[in-house]
Amino acid sequence: MNSTAAALHLTEVPIRSVDDEATVPYADFAIGAFADLVEMSRELSRTGDWVVRTPFGLFVHGYDQARTILREPAWISMLAGVAMLDGSGERDGGRSTVNFNAFMARARRDGSPAASDDAMRARPNVLALEGSDHRRLRRLFGRAFTPAAADRLRPFMAAHAARLIDPLVSAGGGEIVSALCDPYPVPVICRLLGVTDDDWSQFGRWAETIFGLFDGDAEAVLERLGDIAVAQAELGAYVVDLISQRRREPADDLLTELISVSDEGDSLSADELIGMVEALLIAGTDTTRNQLGATLAVLADRPRQYAALRADPDRIPAYVEESLRYIGAVRTAMRIATDDIVVDGLLFPAGTVVMIGLHAASLSGGCPEHAVAASEARSDIAPADADPYEFDPSIPREHPHLAFGSGAHHCLGAFLARAELQEALRAFVDRVERFEVSEPVMWKPLSMGIWGPERMQLQLNAPPSESYIEAGTLPAADSQVRGGVSPERDSFLASVAPLRQAIHASVPELIDRPRFPPLRRLVVTAARIGWATYAGRLLDRRLDADQRRERIYRRLRIAATKLGPAYIKLAQLIAAGEGVFPDALVAECRMCRDRVPAERWPAIRKLVTDELGPLDDRFSRFETEPTAAASIAQVHEAWLTDGTRVMVKVQRPRIRRRVERDLAVLAWIAPKLVGRIPITALANPPALVELFAETITEELDFRVEVANLFEVDHSLRATTSGRWELPSVMLDGVTERVIVMSPVGGRPLSELRPNDLSDGDAAAIFRQMNDALLHGACMSGVFHGDFHAGNVFVDTEAISPGEPPVIGLVDFGITGRLEGPKRVAFLRYVVGLLTGDLQSQVAGMIDLGAFGPGSSPERVIADLRLDRPAFDPLELTEDEFTAEFRALISGLLANGARIPKELMLFIKNFAYLCSVTGELEPDMEVLAQFERIASSFFARNGVRMATEIGFSPAPDDVDEKIIRQAMGISPRHERVTWRLIRGRRENLKARVGNKS
């Protein structure tokens, strides 16, 4: 553990992990403009928390904590993480053996011949190294990036800015971004490096293209990788030639100085020089042009402050610093924890990725008490009542802004950037007496990593116009940020965490095999199940085998309905097992989802009144007949007194006692079934009872279900594709036995027919839901665990060409939860499955508990013979298949195989999606869909995967051969469609049935 953590362990302060349930509050802001961004920062500072969980991960907005993380060596930069994983960097303890190539492999495949392996590998630079490697390069580069070196370029900066501004002044205005901001920084960097004026435009094009690598949209990056590879290759070749020239003919420029610089015999290699030029272009171009545009926009909105600046140009440095603080172009920085680290009482486990809010932290300047304490101690800083969310260069700030970062990765070119901004602003102030925006400013999306105006039309040195147009930098007093933080929701989640723990702690007692079962309940259960199973010998003897089975399944479903909630729930679980259980049994059990006999209205009315108070106080209308009735609850439509339509989920009366009795019966029976049916080695009857108890006991407390809903909602918001609709819950209408919530529109997914959807919609739904399932299980650690017809809806009327479908989810009683090591184990299993890495796949399953104690990946692989290439069980003869089936059962038994709850829920959901999609589009190219889902998942989460499981797959690591092998389909099937898979499944079921 990091030393910070060790020091805190000496105290008695309890250490909470950011992974613990409800430890970190959740925030999700709908940011549409800069005013929203300022209001978001202001609202976050009011919460008293310094870190929040967002759809994009953990966001640190507290000034002190942000600065601590930036300065702590155990937190490494995201770029450094990428470089280490690529093998181009070293940790202090030695070179990393991890292979990180997520984007580069795709670029090599899609790029032109110019995009060679050498061009596309990550070169060492100060942005992408840590430890001794970073210190070495920074020491060598630092000799050239001094204030004196920046000052030597000031005359050129001033003259260059004047050349760009003068035509605008002569014309009385113009579009300032394309005329001044965009063309300004690249020539400065070129002059710094010694690049001739003729090549400025070429450098600008390379900078623009290469910077596309850092777009927040992973899919967009993948599409542009070919162009990025070409630009990087061309830039590398240019710099190699320039280095050769400077070695022959030294000049008064940065490159010559860097070539000659040495420290105790250490000098820079050609590769390091190329990396430095790339880093300078990436870090020094887009930042400066956006910051310059943002600064001018701020002053356009504040004519009085601009007039004050013209009256006192010596204040230009202060204005630039305040602009960097107030509207910094770089708003965030990513850091990865390389160890378990404690920051201000919170534990960040190794591998945790955080987003540091450079802008939000700079605005707040730390906790509110900082300003109070500092203003009492010093008179030269901002008074305690100064508003840090306003632009005011006249107020000295207590804390330096974080626009250039802090610590080891504090911007090496900060002196150069300050000089550029100051000289450009000075040239503008000298020539422009007054200016204003002449049409609405077009800003870049706030989702971009570096932000600023994209188009800004200015009117220069003209009388004020009659209609004033804002540039968009004022913190509007009435700014209402949609979403944001929800203290009520966070408090609710915190209150449910101990409830969930208590429920889990109660399960062992509930399933502890009693010496004597509840005799009366056992007799009733045995009688109903026995009649359903054996009555057919008398009643159905004239029917054929299939008809007899259908009759048995119908009687079993009726018996479950009469036995009550626990057995109805078992039938519902079977109903979701299409492909696992016989189709006729699944079809029969589906009727237990929402067509179970409802409770009588008087009992429901009494329960709702007991939980919420008199109905008339809350509802203007309450339907007495339920819209759906299932094992645990039934749902009624109602209207609040303000006319809002809601759905009210009501638990069946006296259900808890009935469930506890049924669990006692099942716990007594389960051990007697062990070994009776060989295939149950996969499930283990007592383990199934435990799984069932965990699931149904959580469902008995609706407060836990609402907490599940909130957490699944958080996970879905973090996915990059698709639109979702989940119920909005009225928290004052949530109790242990009642939920009041909004309805969800659409039609059940499994009731859709092919003609209900446009071309490509079925594939889009399949990708969206699998993307959410993968992200939830592997990255968020929580996913909806019960996809079926009554829980998944699609709003077909909301689907427009080019738009993703709107998918609605309800009923969050069954939710898959993977916390800490279990989530990492599941991630290892999934990555191993999708990349053909058997060792990782089996190791993940062992850590999940799918195999018994002492199992090893090598033994499991050998016993189950998993390492055979291109194995297709349907190409075996009957005798071979029989031997294979027996060997499989024997290997599973030998390794103590069972299906963990989370794996069962994941597979069940996946099987449902495959079945429904196969009905909607039987001839869909399945392999292409799987490859697209997996490649996108790896591209978005590569760095985090590498920090958590030790390696990171690339998009190209998923190909048709690997997916075929995972599915057991030989290459002789050229097209793999759902029609083919369904036929193979039926064939396998028939063969397994015969052998069983």
Image (tube, rainbow, N blue to C red):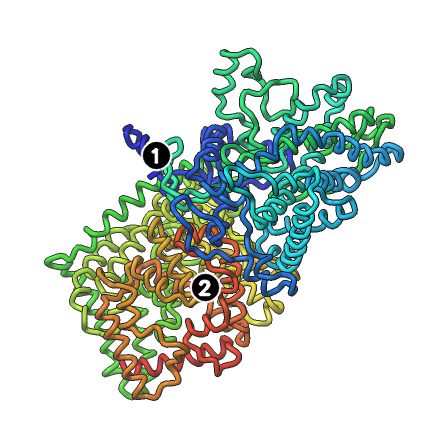
Residue 149 shown left or right of residue 103 in the figure: right
Which amino acid type is marked by label 1? Ser
How many dots with numbers?
A: 2
Q: Nearer the viewer, residue 232 or 304?
A: 232
The answer to whether any part of residue 443 appears in the image is: no
Q: Secondary structure at mark 2?
A: loop
Q: Secondary structure at mark 1?
A: helix
Q: Can you say whether 48 is above or below 243 in the image?
A: above
Residue 342 shown left or right of residue 765 in the figure: left
Residue 355 shown left or right of residue 494 in the figure: right
Q: Nearer the viewer, residue 650 or 477?
A: 477
Q: Nearer the viewer, residue 268 or 616?
A: 268
Which amino acid type is marked by label 2? Ala
Residue 20 placement (x, y as % from top left)? 36, 42
> Are there few (<14), some (14-19), or many (20+) residues within 10 Å of tag 2?
some
On the image, numbered disc 1 is attached to which residue? 3
Residue 465 placement (x, y as % from top left)? 85, 29
On the image, numbered disc 2 is attached to which residue? 789
Q: Can you say whether 524 is above or below 49 in the image?
A: below
Task: Name the residue at the left extreme.
Answer: 515
Residue 139 shown left or right of residue 814 in the figure: right
Q: Earlier in the sequence, mark 1 or mark 2?
A: 1
